[in-house]
Image (cartoon, rainbow, N blue to C red):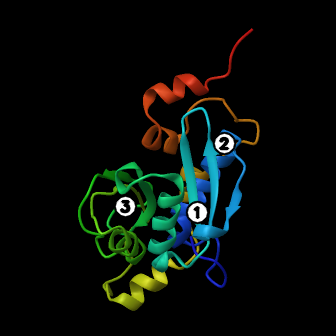
Amino acid sequence: GNPWPVPRLSRHNLGALAVQALAQQRGLAWQWRWGCLCWMAVDDVTNVALVMPAVPYNLAGPAVRRALDSLGASCHDLTVVHDDIDLAPGRSSVKQSGSAGGNRGVRSILDSLGSDAVRRVRLGVGRPAGSDRGPMAVGAHVLSELEEELLERWCGVDASSHGSGPGPLDVLLWPPQAHEACKPRRG
């Protein structure tokens, strides 16, 4: 995500907003980590750490690299959740490796890790309307306000939903056996 002055509810912040919602749904608490300039929320049940760099999105690579180092993890342990203009709004895709596809935040991460073997969950925000596909039009599009439908699809969280079962990102990020471990116990 992007810190101020980029609007918090912009399309470009969709990945960060979805990760925040996932932490809320899981009942995870964020803790500040100075060494990597990131917020982290750790799920001890599944041994998964959610990481949100507190730097501009397009410069997130060094912070992500330092976060992985602090966790003793590698690029093969990482899943990056980000917006993608090449997918229609509401669509998603998982990519195991390859280029950044023009996404500067992803490029920063790949460059900092020295590898393109990074799993990515791409959340579609679509392309700008009209015929202008230049950098200014794309920049204006991703920095504009996120549609309510997309916010609800990827970030909709009922405050009482902790432990109630997997949401849309759970299915993409956690292995199926983790869902079983996180179900509320009856009795």
Q: Dot 1 lies on which element?
A: strand
Q: CA distance from mark 2 to mark 3?
A: 25 Å
Q: Position of residue 184 (x, y in %)?
A: 67, 22
Judged by depth in the image, the label closer to the viewer, 2 or 3, is 2
Of labels 2 and 3, earlier in sequence is: 2
- Residue 52, which numbered label? 1
Of labels 1 and 2, earlier in sequence is: 2
The amino acid pointed to by label 1 is Met
| Residue at the image position 58 percent from the left and 77 percent from the top | 55
Q: CA distance from mark 1 to mark 3?
A: 25 Å
> Mark 3 Cα within 10 Å, few/some/many (few <14, many 20+)?
few
Q: Nearer the viewer, residue 25 or 138?
A: 25
> Mark 2 Cα within 10 Å, few/some/many (few <14, many 20+)?
many
Q: Position of residue 58 (x, y in %)?
A: 46, 79
Q: Which residue is disc 2 drawn over?
A: 25
Q: Which residue is disc 3 drawn over?
A: 88
| Residue at the image position 32 percent from the left and 67 percent from the top | 86
| Residue at the image position 37 percent from the left and 61 percent from the top | 88
Q: Quadrant of the N terminus?
A: bottom right
The amino acid pointed to by label 3 is Ala
Q: Is residue 103 left or right of residue 59?
A: left
